[in-house]
Image: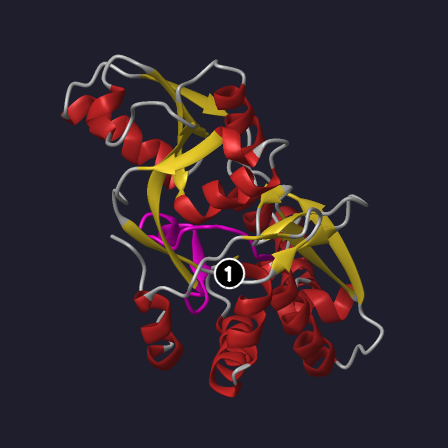
Amino acid sequence: MRLPALKTISILALALAAPAWVAAQPTSTLDKVKQSGAITLAYRESSIPFSYLDDKAQPIGFAHEICMKIVDQVKKATGHPDLKVNFQAVTSANRIPLLQNGTIDIECGSTTNNSERGKQVQFAINYFYTGTRFLVKAGTQIKTIDDLKGKTIVSTTGTTNYKILRNLNEEKKLGMDLLGAKDHADAALMVETGRAVAFGMDDILLYGLRASSQNPASLAVVGDPIQVEPYAIMLRRDDPAFKKLVDDTLAGMMKSGEFTKLYTKWFQSPIPPKGINLNAPMSQELIDNLKALSDKPAT
């Protein structure tokens, strides 16, 4: 009879302890931030003009500024006006795992909102639309993906672009040698140094990389967009309170005109570090979404 009694006591002890343990675990990003007094923002090192490093190695950009606006609202929601803001560099390959395991709390960069990723994370309102094109050396006789048959190309590992190019390579039997780079800057360098004839990536990122290169005139962005995809802020799944805060912040910026002013600053004005203007007007898809406020993913 003593063993069952001990077992009963153990089970009772666990039952009494469980509520305290559960209470200690943050149930949402806002709870996590409130308990820790800090929030961690992810940034990219070369996703110009969304999120990248300036000449002082500090994160800046269109998406980064939006994230900082969101932080202002998080401070109000958590009652932490002195909230500590930490920054964490991420790559295309590790951004989702680092969000899932709690290393980062929000990712504002150049991440495509698609259905497959939606099984692992959730996205806020879409804030940009782009399509896959190619960065090549100026003067190269490449206009379409068919011109790349049998050639060596590169894309960034962990991106939707890499997957699209791999699938097209197989479907169209192009015989391309598709290389994977760890980040956009590395992929662009492979084109500049002749290790690849083309870098397939979102066109706006290619324009940014071209503009920030040592010799912009030596590079060109070519081809019609293979597909159009939305960018959105990435959040952890099953966190409706934080998604609402982020969506409300974005919606407020879009309705007030603040978003459009920020777009003009980063896409239609000289930007650091070289003061180059990307001259990228707002797409019709984005103009429409300033009213629709949709978080619809790409298929």
Q: Furthest-left residue in view?
A: 172
Q: Position of residue 274 (x, y in %)?
A: 69, 46
Q: Nearer the viewer, residue 151 or 90?
A: 151
Q: Residue at x 85, y 73 (%)?
A: 82
For the view shown, which residue lies furthest in the bottom direction? 256
Residue at the location (65% across, 73% down)?
69
Residue 226 in picture, x, y percent from top left: 25, 42
Q: What is the basis of the colouring in this image?
A: secondary structure
Say if residue 28 shows up in the picture: no
For residue 149, what is the image quadrant? top left
SS of the residue under disc 1: loop
Q: Is residue 253 left or right of residue 198?
A: right
Compared with 269, 175 (above or below) is above
**As displayed, is residue 180 above or below residue 164?**
above
Q: Residue furthest right?
A: 82
Q: Which residues are magenta?
A: 106-127
Is residue 97 located in the magenta-colored stretch of the structure? Answer: no
249 or 274, which lies in front?
274
Q: Residue at x 64, y 31 (%)?
A: 214
Amino acid type, callout 1: Ile
Q: Is residue 46 above or below residue 242?
A: above
Helix, strand or loop for the magenta stretch, by majority = loop
The total number of labels drawn is 1
Residue 212 x/y as whole percent:
61, 40
Is residue 284 among the parts visible in the rendering? yes
Near mark 1 (Cα within 10 A), the count class, few <14, some 14-19 or many ≥20, is many
Of residue 137 and residue 187, the one placed in the foreground of this image is: 137
Q: Which residue is mark 1?
A: 233
Q: Looking at the image, which residue is at 64% across and 41% down?
A: 45
Q: Position of residue 103 (x, y in %)?
A: 66, 48
Tell whether 248 sits left or right of 32.
left
